[in-house]
Amino acid sequence: MFGRSYFCGEVPESAVGEKVTLKGWVQKRRDLGGLIFIDLRDRSGIVQVVFNPDLSKEALQTAEKIRSEFVLDVVGTVVAREAGTVNENLKTGKIEIQADAVTIINEAKTPPFTISDNTDASEDVRLKYRYLDFRRPVIFETLKMRHQVTKQIRDFLDGEGFLDIETPILTKSTPEGARDYLVPSRVHPGEFYALPQSPQLFKQLLMVGGIERYYQIARCFRDEDLRADRQPEFTQIDIETSFLSQEDIMGMMEKMMTQLMREVKGVEVPAAFPRMTYDEAMSRFGSDKPDTRFGLELVDVSEIVKDSGFKVFAGAVAGGGQVKALNVKGSADKYSRKDIDALTEFTAVYGAKGLAWLKVDAEGLKGPIAKFFSAEDAQALKATLEASEGDLLLFVADKKNVVADALGALRLKLGKELGLIDNSLFHFLWVTDWPLLEYDEEEGRYYAAHHPFTMPFREDLEYLDSDPGKVRAQAYDLVLNGYELGGGSLRIFERPVQEKMFSVLGFSPEEAKEQFGFLMNAFEYGTPPHGGIALGLDRLVMLLAGSSNLRDTIAFPKTASASCLLTNAPGEVSEAQLVELNLSLNVKK
Amino acid sequence: MFGRSYFCGEVPESAVGEKVTLKGWVQKRRDLGGLIFIDLRDRSGIVQVVFNPDLSKEALQTAEKIRSEFVLDVVGTVVAREAGTVNENLKTGKIEIQADAVTIINEAKTPPFTISDNTDASEDVRLKYRYLDFRRPVIFETLKMRHQVTKQIRDFLDGEGFLDIETPILTKSTPEGARDYLVPSRVHPGEFYALPQSPQLFKQLLMVGGIERYYQIARCFRDEDLRADRQPEFTQIDIETSFLSQEDIMGMMEKMMTQLMREVKGVEVPAAFPRMTYDEAMSRFGSDKPDTRFGLELVDVSEIVKDSGFKVFAGAVAGGGQVKALNVKGSADKYSRKDIDALTEFTAVYGAKGLAWLKVDAEGLKGPIAKFFSAEDAQALKATLEASEGDLLLFVADKKNVVADALGALRLKLGKELGLIDNSLFHFLWVTDWPLLEYDEEEGRYYAAHHPFTMPFREDLEYLDSDPGKVRAQAYDLVLNGYELGGGSLRIFERPVQEKMFSVLGFSPEEAKEQFGFLMNAFEYGTPPHGGIALGLDRLVMLLAGSSNLRDTIAFPKTASASCLLTNAPGEVSEAQLVELNLSLNVKK
């Protein structure tokens, strides 16, 4: 224990009678009847220290100088508290320390905010004084959980024969994906390193090299503007394997996450996670990362309404779109016209041109559009939507992707508003069979939906030319409670297939060679089938910690606020440094 | 095992009779008497596969197409080899696989070098085709050892209550130390992030925050020219603790390294490492990182020779310098005058103006300078140097630091040449009591010998103004076999001491506030005493792997050779990217 007898929060009842040395910070001082009481805190918790003039006048005199956040060395005797003074809310609440001696190791100014879980400080102030924020138990416990999560994952992967291998941070830029952070090279003037957006190419080269099982808790970088749910530098659990099938990899991840949940959260989740194709997820939940902790699924009523007199519905179906509905059970009375107008505005953000609604009462469907439906259609709607008295039915009629986006977002909003989500649940889900390519209408070209190294379904290869949008990828995303934890895929490992893929993505053979030549050359020297996954550590810890703030999971997060930049902000450099890098500023600061 | 029965190198004798599936690379193919033999390799090792037309004509026909480094899926039966064909050099040498079926998963071009430990390739070629280099067992085993080293260290530190906490890669530049890599900020045009040379400031802030025990296997960066023993991005085992004494920290590291040596190398090293002050190390070994696996220590003979007729010796002592000698036991006959001339040239590189020598024969001292010494002086020299017949005595007379540098380097050279070093030994050593400051004669100012946060000895504080060179630091370096594994110190944790230190280092109060204000502010809010250490992982693995090439311990090392830049080289960027970063090139590429 190195000079202390116990951590403050861990002094046991069995220590009563022991002479102990404790070190820590002053949480609180109270003067009462000639005695001084101090709550002494370290990262483990709090213990009460009593200064009594009958025991040591000198210690009491020192204690009189003590203020919050002073650092102390306390020597004293552990005693049982008297019956009336036991504090049941404190782990050490049945004992206290009668101080013989105290040393003030360091003093402290009054902190700018209260050091407690329920602090009064804004996040800006907390981040500016992050070193004080760390002393709040909730932040310490989140960082501790992050440690436990990575330790557990490392232990699991080590047991499965994975090697932890570091890949470079100063790398060569490769196109596709987000904007790179660039690092000017002094040795190669006018050239730039890029910080990696992921170790993708390196881990594939490791597989070519026969490493077979690689992992890394890898720092990655994207030069994007700060957003609440995104940091420009982030950490991913990066995994790659050889000779394994998609099923093998998914099974291994299930085993890893199941153990993680048990060891870190004490929660049992199913050994095999539910699976859903991308198409099914979009169809039932209007999302490629559905939160399956509650129902309120999207139901297709196009067939029923396509011949109805309601032109909006009929027209949408006739135009190749669809009509889908949510049945908000028992909520007919909860939503006034005004409330529904607000929901309509909400869906408009996602492109919906309107939100139609019906309420179900004892007699049937009610609402402005009820008149458009025949008795049979009304009956069919009720049956298909499993509607009964008191239900609210909400409809969007539009192109398929607009219907999915609008109703998918509305479903989440209503799920939260109506308290349909049990926050104690952890619902893992695999989303599989992703489209390989996405069409960008503005640019008139296809993009890789995951990345250009993702293996297409063998049986879909024939469509790469004729109907690229139809080609499915051997890709899988792991979803937890509606958040994408990460995604993986089997990779292309044959040069001809990779060349074809680059060609579909619009690279000329020369461009492909220039940018990915080293990988395609490597493919010619005996490349094994390989695939892997990358999971976002920051988000995983956030979800396990029950937090909704990504920054709380990162010791020193980036923030856009100038007042809390601490040490993680850029600074100015000298003219001499710029000259050495062959650079000048376009506009002087 | 995911679709395979065993790894190739681990098919046990007990599997004889089993039908197995194996996957791997072709190490070698031999055709013999109508049969085809293939050595199938994966990361675990090799197993022999036999194709016999009596078993499967189809498999044999496929086998005829197989060449080195093809990737195969083999199904067959494990059989015991006949007595005469057992290969004792192979772990699987008592069995072989009789193939029923084989699938060529992927083909391979002829590799540019032999995939074996004793390869014929230059390092340039190996690095250009690093993915093939990984297939050489010696490289795989080194990467595996690196994994084991970090795993062992993580397990140990986790058990001691340390939290693995990530600190930022994009940070604010702080002065002192080497040149920073700079990253232009797009969001703050004209400003630059710096990549960290170490997480020093962050880990101190974590201590201010009450984390108490932090560690990180941390990537660090120095924009220095490439050298054989240095990489611009490197990894350090970064540790910081609160409330621990120097003795506590050193003891904890001894426990960590002792366990590491046992678990990873199967070597027992003493539970407590020898300790030596900086002054003693310089005096006895002429080095601040002595290799203590052999003797050949520097012996001071100044007192004996200061009044001798040899003006070089007498003059050096009179001028405040010293005369020291090495006794190269039993080597008088091994070194001719020409050999000694070569040693003289060698010491000249370290500033020595000459290398005097004497040989000891039955009658006494022999050599050109023998005549300058009286019988008593000669006797005193022999006694002090413990010289006997056949010994070679080598002398340098100069300023203290030149004597240390020249004889220290000469000692190492002779130790290697004469085979005095037992390479199976692992000698750990602590070097303590470092000078806090070093005087730079050219610049006429003091520099921090470690870094400006190192705590001086309390009792030396009074000399900070009057005699700064005399102030000792509470710093400790860990040395292994003559290499500096890393160094640590207790840190300054009081604002007045830190301000004084910055002032001695020549910072004005304004500069100190500008550059380190956030740390000094933090010190005012209850900072605990703290200290830590940083150990170089790359070098540690190199020494444990018995390698002398740092690059072999790094999966994707940097190299200055254009032909082996692979993916870790800088590249060109577009004009648009530069504009976005508010930059232009001074000289166009």
Image (cartoon, coloured by chain):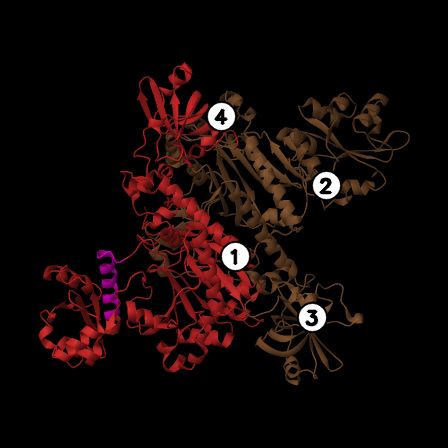
Chain colours: A red, B brown
Tell whether position B501 is magenta.
Answer: no
**Percent position of residue A55, x then y:** 42, 16
Q: As shown in the figure, which amino acid type bears the numbered disc 3?
A: Val
Of residues B164 and A224, the one drawn nearer to the viewer in this rendering: B164
Residue A157 numbered tag: 1
**Percent position of residue A323, x then y:** 21, 74
Mark 3 or 2, nearer chain start? 3
Q: Are marks 3 and 2 on the same chain?
A: yes
Of residues A164 and B404, the one drawn nearer to the viewer in this rendering: A164
State the residue position of label 2.
Answer: B345
The part of the image, by quadrant, that contains residue A326 is: bottom left
Q: In this view, does B226 lie to the left or right of B171?
A: right
Q: As shown in the figure, which amino acid type bears the numbered disc 1?
A: Leu
| Chain of the residue under label 1 | A
- What kind of element bears circle 4? loop
Q: Do labels 3 and 4 share a chain?
A: no
Q: Main secondary structure of the magenta part?
A: helix
Between disc 1 and disc 2, the foreground one is 1
Between disc 4 and disc 1, the foreground one is 4
Q: As shown in the figure, which amino acid type bears the numbered disc 4?
A: Glu
- What kind of element bears circle 3? loop
Q: Is disc 1 surrounded by few (<14), some (14 to 19) or many (20+) residues within 10 Å?
A: many
Q: Are marks 3 and 1 on the same chain?
A: no
State the residue position of label 3.
Answer: B16
Residue at 75%, 41% in the rendered image: B414
- What kind of element bears circle 1? helix
Residue A18 numbered tag: 4
Assign the N terminus of chain B to one quadrant of the image.
bottom right
Assign the C terminus of chain B to one quadrant of the image.
bottom left
Mark 4 or 1, nearer chain start? 4
**Percent position of residue A89, x then y:** 34, 36
